[in-house]
Amino acid sequence: MRRGVKLGIVATLTAGLVGTAGYGAYNIYDSLSGGGGFSAAAAPAETGPPTAAEVKKTAADFLAAWAKGDTTAAGALTNDASTASADLAAYRQDAHVARVRLTPGTAQGDVVPFKVVASLSYKGKTSTWTYSSKLTVFRGETTHRPLVDWQPAVMHPKLTEGQSLETGEATSPPVDVVDRNGKVLDADDYPSLASVLPQLRERYGAKLSGGKPGIETWVNGGDGPGQTLHVIAEGTPAKLPTTLDARAQKAAEQAVKNKSQSSVAAVKASTGEILAFANNPSSDNNNAFNAQVAPGSTFKVVTATALLEKGVTPGTPAPCPATANHDNGKMFHNVESSSDPSATFQRDFAISCNTGFIKLAGRLDESSVPSVAKRYYGFGQTWNVGVPAWDGRVPGGPGDEMTEEMIGQGQIQMSPLNMASIAATVQNGVFRQPRLVAADMIEGPLAKAGSGLPSGVRGNLKSMMRLTASSGTAAGAMRGVYGDVGAKTGSAEVGGQEQPNGWFVAYRGDVAAGGMVLEGGHGGDSAGPIVASVLKASS
């Protein structure tokens, strides 16, 4: 718990309140004090909503009493005198409010907005806190007097029933999240980090050394210290290192701006360290890590792994007809019904021929693709990335489900991070689970694959991905991306959408990236330039 030393505070009414219209000395009703002023024949009790004049006067008297520190008088003007008096006393004592100025605004019916300027003092540190609140005036059912409807929200709009304000030393220092080179990462500069930075601070802030706590005012009640509402004195931040690279992150943020509903993630192939991720729009969902959608033909990297294990080679004849099915099942087609009767397996891969893969389905069984996905690419287990992230799903199945999964559809569900990891595994030869912070900071084990890719299979995969990047469907996007490169495009059809989801995976040297544009159409045209931009910035 955060703690604050409860000091007795003498509150003074700011001079600006004295003499202002409606802010005269507090006049408690004669009927409360038992004094005179009424004739033997009492006036008829008022009924109905309070008048505008009553609303104005009741609010003014209540605010004046609160500002003076006369909590008894202020409480008496509410429908819960004892609770209101206690809450207002705690406001001064627990929140360390030395004095408060309360300025009413124009009433809107029975609601009166007001401005609060509170002077806070704690252990020699002082601060002025300005905010707005409001109160409601109604007529009491038994007293028939105009009263303030007491709620903790009168003191501050963030308060709910059972909550109060407290000022003291924070439980821990503030935390600066930094990139791999020590650069502070800020959501203003990197908007896709807005939802992730608080998650990192919450999960790992208490594990950090260094830094000094600040002095804050926060919401107290419920399960413990809640939202910080005001900072009296900034603490010295502790540093939380991440695997991110600020340069790559900036490139990712810029790249997704060009396409709505787009996401990208990049990893270091040899370690699994996440170098960048971005989303447009930048939302709490973080689709780069948490999207659960079919990846289309980019998943043919995994399918090709299964076929290569079964003896298919890049040069194996694999005709690409306009349509094809397997075992009298669902009929599949290619983009724009293209065909190539003389195609080889590597040609099918490079031009993203669906039917060529479907005609090879007899080489596999319903467990082949899920088995390869788990054995070499780390799926089928929990990925402890450091923040919430989807683990990927390759369920397998007979009949049409098997053939649909061969081209990255059916019930397969992936995120851009999952697909970036697949490309990274091909480049590195061994699956390294993606992570956002140091492995020793993460609770729970990192996912591991059963083994590395067989050298021959890996060599063939790299050869086919290189061909796709140089003269296949990825060539346009990869133009200008030099070095040891490979890529694969994908277009995942979704029922009810006019355009398929566009996908793209690629690697360059030790960096691999996966990108997605929902309803983007062809992956090479939509997601490809996004991935290429990140790869260029990550050299």
Image (spheres, helix red, strand yellow):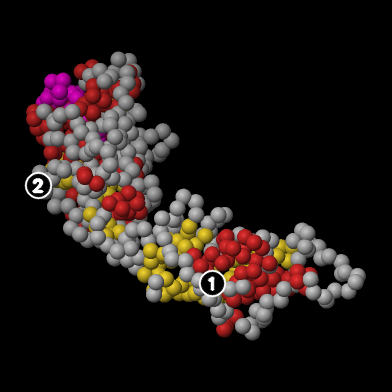
Q: Which mark is residue 116?
A: 1
Front-lying residue, 40 or 538: 40
Mark 1 packing: few (<14 Cα in 10 Å), some, or many (20+)? many
Q: Mark 2 — residue?
A: 483
Name the quadrant containing residue 309: top left
Name the quadrant containing residue 307: top left
Residue 498 within the segment the image draws in magenta: no
Mark 2 packing: few (<14 Cα in 10 Å), some, or many (20+)? few
Residue 195 in percent (x, y) is at 36, 52
Location of the N terminus by quadrant is bottom left
Task: Report the magenta residues as a range.
Answer: 298-322
Front-lying residue, 23 or 13: 13
Which residue is pictured at 28% across the width and 19% down the height? 366
- Tag 2: amino acid: Gly
Name the quadrant containing residue 454: top left
Residue 477 in percent (x, y) is at 21, 46
Secondary structure at numbered mark 2: loop
Q: Earlier in the sequence, mark 1 or mark 2?
A: 1
Q: Is residue 268 left or right of residue 11?
A: left
- Tag 1: amino acid: Val
Which residue is pictured at 22% across the width and 61% down the height? 183
Which residue is pictured at 26% across the width and 20% down the height? 367
Secondary structure at numbered mark 1: strand
Asked whether residue 280 is in view, the answer is no
